[in-house]
Amino acid sequence: MSALRITVNGREHVLSAPPETTLLALLREHLGLTGAKLGCDVGDCGACTVLVDGQAVNACLMLAAQADGRSVLTIEGLATPDGLHPLQEAFERHAALQCGFCGPGAILSAKALLDANPAPTGAEIRDALAGNLCRCTGYTKMITAVHAAAQALRGAGAEMPPLGLTASPSIPLPGGEKGGGLS
Amino acid sequence: MVLDISRAADMRGIAATADGLRIGALVTHSELVRSPLVREFAPVLAEAARTIGAVQTRNLGTLGGNLATGVPSMDSGPALLALEARVTVAGPRGTRTLALGDFFVGPRRTALATDELLVDVVVPAASLGKPASFLKFGLRKGQALALVNVAAAVRVDPDRRAFVAPRIALGAVAPTVIRAPQAEAFLEGRPPTSEAMAEAGRIAATEARPISDFRASADYRRELVSVLARRALAAACARAQGAQ
Amino acid sequence: MSDRRTVTEDPALRESLSGLEASARLPATLPPAQFPIETLVPEVRQQTPAVGQRATRPDARLHGLGQTKYIDDLALPGMLHARIKRAGIAAARIVRIDTRAAEAMPGVMAVVTGRDVPVNSFGPSLQDQPVLADERVYHAGDGVAAVAAATDAIAAEALERIVVEYAPLPAVLDPFEAMREDAPRVHPPASNVYAHKIIRKGDVERALAEADRVFEGRWTTQMVEHVPIEPHAAIAAWDANGRLTVYSTLGRITLGRADIARTLALPVNRVQVIGTIVGGNFGGKNEISQEPVLALLAKKAGRPVKGVFTRGEEFYASTTRHPFFMDYKTGVGRDGRIRARKVRLVLDGGAYCSWSETTLGKACILATGPYRIEHVQVEAFAVYTNKTVAGAMRGFGAPQVCFAYESQMDEIAAALGIDPLEIRLANAFDEGAASPTGQTLESVVVKASLEQAAARFGWREPRS
Ligand SMILES: Cc1cc2nc3c(=O)[nH]c(=O)nc-3n(C[C@H](O)[C@H](O)[C@H](O)COP(=O)(O)OP(=O)(O)OC[C@H]3O[C@@H](n4cnc5c(N)ncnc54)[C@H](O)[C@@H]3O)c2cc1C
């Protein structure tokens, strides 16, 4: 067994785990933090993305022992009792979450990007999200959401937006036209 | 058995030494991309590291791990081979250094004995600042292994208007990452014209020994070598002439 | 601000617990910040004023918080982990399966094979698929045995210790070869052609003979896997009354429930299937796969059992989109009007029928495209091969035929020197048009859509 001292979402844990335990298994099975998902188990899909000392990593490819003495942020540690993180709000508002399975990983990749680069270009966002595969929503909405969150972080924080339908018919289309049904 | 080497301090770090640029085997691809030393003295290595996997892969994956896999499509191999890098290997019988070209033995096979570690990689002083370029062709831009990758490093003698010590390295088209010695010999001393570089690309394609697999056919890969080698040479050459 | 946002310290919780500190211990892991669950409950027959409105998904809140529980995020007390051994050979007779070494492994709690399945066949239309192959292997992704163990790693290791002896049989991998009389039968004695449909309207042969120009071509599409980021996952648990509860990523739980009950020889009312939030389906989770296996393992072990497909299994042991081979013969007037279209479709169905009949039906109806054509003949065949199963995937055959007819449309336009947009406008359905099967179509906006799209990307503007 490996003795580990790991800070997860701001709280320190002293644990022992078999040496082959991955960081993902530690989080999901031992700490009950299931926000990071097992999608492919080989580092391709990014559903298991967490931040270790602020850097995005695939938790399925990292042994828990490698995180000894380090600080891990999972999706569960992103919101505070006061409200959502601007990225969470923006992903929700811009429909960047559909089935939601890739969402936690994509949001954390975006968090690592915005921490290092508060005003990224579209190309930089694409690069930061290249390791987070999504099969439903499409990446365009995620990119819009990251832009919006970056803006919010540079300005004010985010509150809890209302769920559901809101009377704002301004879904922007490429080229700046307004959306609408077929005429 | 799993041995965690991730905290071995003397296998970390990037330093400029009298021998050249010393890069610890545990340096991650992200560290290479960000390193001011690499960007100044061997930017082609940062260019290659930038194309590896995605951010998550680059944050965890190490240069030593990349080389030690011996996978022919590795992206750091061609860049380092074009810069004529050497590697340091340590084990119970002591430490030895060898040319990177001798480190690669076969597909997924290296000169490492089972009880040896790759300690560091040294880009020799003579190659520091040598104008170079790395190009990779994958099935998509992010998170894709190379169908073919090519690195070229050249100097151009401004007086003779001639190539000096051109180096071309090819990945994913042979059992290991390889150099293209005939193409290099063809260019040596020749004026840096686009015709010469195109011909060197064609020669390099004949030196490649690609296989057909589910990613691409051997013919397609050979064609890619000829195009990418020409373009990598042109980019390296432009850098050489821009630096003068 | 960013610090406060990254560290989940719940001061209120701390405060309220501090008085208890002497008598109560904080749990090893405090639950992360949780939010009240708000969802929108639609009212029956309520007309949602959705058009022109901005809608957010009600479930997106918990998705973004990482609070959504997918099947693999659930654990029942004492739950075991299952793995299924895959055949790895396209066609064979199973001579013998020896599971003794696996059963003897510490941590292995149950092993099952096809012999343990009460009714070893299922399928949404034809029941041609074994739960676990027992006598014969039909494709390499067939399961031949399954293990439930204390950990997933032990289960995986136990699979390695199961010995299966195969007598290889000739495999048929090409659908055209499979259609030949002398081809090996995938499911002997049944024919390899397991579904066939023909649609006729007008007199296609005469119209083709009389057409100014006749265009012919073959288009093919490849096999496509859905690749949901969430793999197939399920948990099976029995209660004291012998009732089975299955939590599953299954998209069609009522159909799945009937299939599970049938394979286990249980009355349907003994089976409860719980579907939860699914991490991507796209048609690939529309029928049962491992659920009966997990139920049998759970019964044998006396504990709940969870199974999660590996990414590899997603590719070879789940369904895929049918590869299509599409022959088109189209008779056209010099004016670009299509007079007749004759289509022959061959669907490579892989080893089992799955949703092939639906796919074949839809492909046939849509094969001639959204165009007014007086003389039509469409004939389609779904064919068994010893390959990964083709089944439902978004569009059920519509994307494949669309690729063919639109590709041919471009070829016709180019050959006749007609603008690709104009040739489509000249042929497209109008309101009230009849489909090849005689259905009167309403709300037809093909032309309006084409016009609007053309206007948006400036199709008619001069190109430089
Ligand atoms: C999703 C994904 C995408 C990828 N994309 C690319 C890509 O585009 N291009 C590319 O080149 N690579 C790619 N890779 C491969 C991978 O990133 C590299 O090979 C990586 O550098 C491995 O480093 P590591 O430290 O993780 O090594 P490990 O995976 O830990 O080790 C690899 C092997 O090398 C041995 N080893 C490691 N370090 C040493 C050492 N110092 N001495 C001796 N032996 C050692 C290990 O024992 C093991 O056998 C990808 C990998 C993944 C998972």
Image: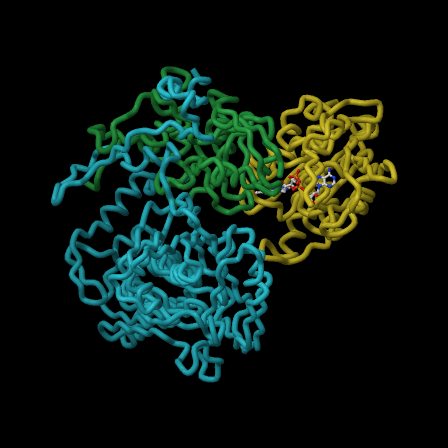
Chain colours: A green, B yellow, C cyan
The residue sitting at 61% across, 35% down in the picture is A65
**Which quadrant holds the C terminus of chain C?**
top left
Furthest-left residue in this view: C45
Q: Position of residue C367 (x, y in %)?
A: 31, 63
Q: Choose top left, top right, bottom left or bottom right for residue A164.
A: top left
| Ligand 1 placement by image quarter | top right
Q: Is residue C61 visible?
A: yes
Q: Position of residue C267 (x, y in %)?
A: 26, 66
The residue sitting at 85% across, 39% down in the picture is B92
C31 over C339 or under it: above or below: above
The residue sitting at 27% across, 70% down in the picture is C376
**Which sits in the foreground, C10 or C253?**
C10
Q: Choose top left, top right, bottom left or bottom right for residue C129.
A: bottom left
Q: Is residue B44 visible?
A: no
Q: How many marks?
A: 0
C347 left or right of C337 in image = right
The residue sitting at 40% across, 30% down in the picture is C31
**Which sits in the foreground, C371 or C402?**
C402
Q: Position of residue C366 (x, y in %)?
A: 29, 62
B169 left or right of A175 in image = right
**Which quadrant holds the N terminus of chain C?**
top left
A139 over C81 or under it: above or below: above
Q: Position of residue C125 (x, y in %)?
A: 31, 69
